[in-house]
Amino acid sequence: MKAAIISLRSKSSEMSIEAMRNHFDEVDDLDIKNLEVNLGVKQLELLYEGEPIKDYDCVYAKGSFRYSPLLASTTSILSGKGVYLPIEARSFTISHDKLLTHIELQKHNIPMSKTYLSATPEAAKKLLGRLNFPIVMKFPQGTQGKGVMIADSFAGASSMLDALSALKQPFIIQEYIETGGVDIRAIVVGGKVVASMKRKATGEEKRANIHAGGKGEPYELDFNTKKIAIETAKAVGADICGVDILESVKGPLVIEVNISPGLQGITAATRINVADKIAKFLSEKANEMKEGVKEVGVKKILTDLGVEKAGHGLITSLDFRGKRILLPDMITDMTKFTTDHDYVIEAKEGELKIKKFEM
């Protein structure tokens, strides 16, 4: 089987590629910057370095929010072509925008902290008067804790808004959940939490992200928290993603979703080879899809040949023991042949028929 990773070639992507080469026959490392979508022609074209992209059994597309339109377009074009895609096209739009993420999670009843959106600093200041401090302020886009600020008072938040007004971006304002600078990162792969850790902020830093200096340690999630992480991944359309959760007095609260999660920190903290778990899952799903496509094709061929019950046919190579033919186990199961009966065998070049002998 052939696979490809489309990414910005981060360390995590390198880890995934190395692991995938243990599960696929061929794995290509495609730089997202060399992708091109060709519109305005008879058929949508996806090009890599100016040439039509090769046929793959699996394509794992991931990368920065800055490339979300290209990633969404790429997966949309590949969808329906017999390629397994662990991230749906819609997921790049949803998960790379914190506001859209929160809206989607709200639709699926995923627990979150109270969240507000304000289009202008003036509107945000009016909102501040109704909130309890401290509060969290974010830009809709950004990862690894970047663009996240903590304001301890109205005056502090107001000053931040004045300074940020030049950026002309909407603001997301959230209630601050006190956890002592600790949060949880869960990696969901194929509807299972394959690894999880607690992250703790260091020094005066309140963000627990590993890229912000947070320290990770292995942590086993309870059933409810695992369920929330899995439902979150499903809500945003991702078979592979990281889910960040706060343990509050209200219970687990999802604060962020990352469909291109870093693997170094959680691998080091848990000693779990997360990249290999991802690679194994991709291989299994790609094989399932390939076999599913093959099965549909076989049924059509059998129907075209006049076999009324195409599900009872089988296209396969034959296993020979010397000059003897050894039929697959599936044939025995389907025919219910046993050594207790006699059988009529009709054979000619290119054809073999076996049926139970009836007196």
Image (spheres, rainbow, N blue to C red):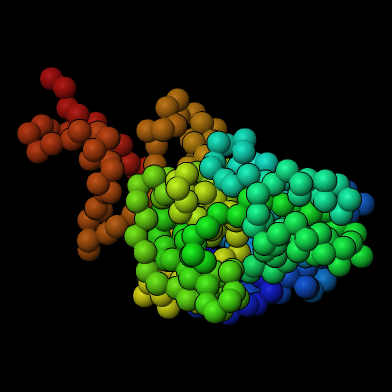
Q: Does residue 176 show up?
A: yes
Q: Is residue 274 above or below residue 318?
A: below
Image quadrant where residue 345 sits:
top left
Q: Quadrant of residue 269?
A: bottom left
Q: Residue at x 67, y 62 (%)?
A: 152
Residue 228 at what x, y percent from top left? 47, 46
For residue 149, above or below residue 192: below
Report the quarter where the C terminus lies.
Answer: top left
| 155 horizontally vs 321: left or right | right
Image spot of residue 292 (x, y percent): 49, 44
- The image shows a total of numbered marks equal to 0
Q: Nearer the viewer, residue 256 or 274?
A: 256
Q: What residue is drawn where x is 73% and y is 70%?
A: 32
**Percent x, y for residue 324?**
22, 56
Foreground of the two, 15 or 36:
15
Asked if residue 78 can be seen in this view, the reply is no
Residue closer to the observer: 194 or 344: 194
Q: Quadrant of residue 27?
A: bottom right
The percent coordinates of residue 223 (x first, y second) are 35, 47
